[in-house]
């Protein structure tokens, strides 16, 4: 394979498409599969039962598929699955799953993972996510599509962050963040909605205003969460053009075992 540098160590059992590029001094283990068009930078280490999809770019010194940082891990054949067209920058760490959860850590498609990001065991990440430098996800964290985490954000284990939500620089998230909400501070609290992100993704002004009304029902109307959910349901019937987004908010709150940031 002409795309593999002479100094790279690629196990004979690894399955690499013939178009994969592997840089100098990279190390790739026997249970690794890499699909077409993916580029592996210098000194990258890829190990464990790891599958990597098409057209990803992994920059130098990343650690992909290492054993989870969990003292219960006993060498089980857990997995890491990376989708397509992701960019993973320098010194990122993505670990395998554990037998105590689904047994797999997942990264979806079209994500932008900046330098020094840590994605721990059993995290489940969707698509079109941006994780700024040094964002750190503890184990079992779920990020829905279009999430943006500011630099040095930390997320407590088992937290979920909903679609289109974002965090400010150095936010410390210890409870779930509903869709569209901006979280800031240590500990993170709600700070409005991610209106600029919604504009960039083509949400109409009417839809954004409806989401803002939903935010106010949750956080500004003095309602209990149960009453806020009822109010959101009523708002859905009044604003059909944004009903799906209000429903997303309502269903997220109803299904949050940790409770949402308040």
Image: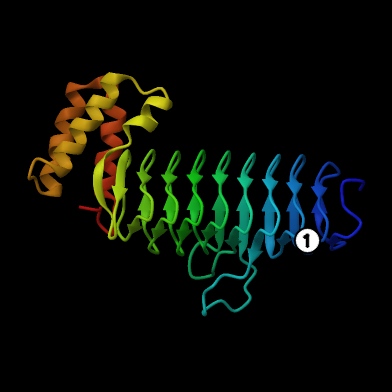
How many labels, in total?
Answer: 1
The residue depicted at 45 percent of the width and 40 percent of the height is 145
Circle 1 packing at 10 Å, graded few (<14), some (14-19), many (20+), is many
In this view, 182 is above or below 73: above
The residue depicted at 39 percent of the width and 59 percent of the height is 155
Query: Would residue 4 appear left or right of 132 to someone viewing this image?
Result: right
Q: Position of residue 215 (x, y in %)?
A: 21, 38
Query: What residue sits right under mark 1 in the picture?
Result: 28
Q: Foreground: 24 or 32?
A: 24
Q: Position of residue 5 (x, y in %)?
A: 88, 53
In this view, 120 is above or below 232: below
Query: Would residue 44 appear left or right of 127 to someone viewing this image?
Result: right
Q: Position of residue 66 (x, y in %)?
A: 64, 67
Q: Foreground: 112 or 10?
A: 112
The residue depicted at 31 percent of the width and 43 percent of the height is 182
Query: Would residue 2 appear left or right of 135 to someone viewing this image?
Result: right
The residue depicted at 66 percent of the width and 58 percent of the height is 62
């Amino acid at each position: 394979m002409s795309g593999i540098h002479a100094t790279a160590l690629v196990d004979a059992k690894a399955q690499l498409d013939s178009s994969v590029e592997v840089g100098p001094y990279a190390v790739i283990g026997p249970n690794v599969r890499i699909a077409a068009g993916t580029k592996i930078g210098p000194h990258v280490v890829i190990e464990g039962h790891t599958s990597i999809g098409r057209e990803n770019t992994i920059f130098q010194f990343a650690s992909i598929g290492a054993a989870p940082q969990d003292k219960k891990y006993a060498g089980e054949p857990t997995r890491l699955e990376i989708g397509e067209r992701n960019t993973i920058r320098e010194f990122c760490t993505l670990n395998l799953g554990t037998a105590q959860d689904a047994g797999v850590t997942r990264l979806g498609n079209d994500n932008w993972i900046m330098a020094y990001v840590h994605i721990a065991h059993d995290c489940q990440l969707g698509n079109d996510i941006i994780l700024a430098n040094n964002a750190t996800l503890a184990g079992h964290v779920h990020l829905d599509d279009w999430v943006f985490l500011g630099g040095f954000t930390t997320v407590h284990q088992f937290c979920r962050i909903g679609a289109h939500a974002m965090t400010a620089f150095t936010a410390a998230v210890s409870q779930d963040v509903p869709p569209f909400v901006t979280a800031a501070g240590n500990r993170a609290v709600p700070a409005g909605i991610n209106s600029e992100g919604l504009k960039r993704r083509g949400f109409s002004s009417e839809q954004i205003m409806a989401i803002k009304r939903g935010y106010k029902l949750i956080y500004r109307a003095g309602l209990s969460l149960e009453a806020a959910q009822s109010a959101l349901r009523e708002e859905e019937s009044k604003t059909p053009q944004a009903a799906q987004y209000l429903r997303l908010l309502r269903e997220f709150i109803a299904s949050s075992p940790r409770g949402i940031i308040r």
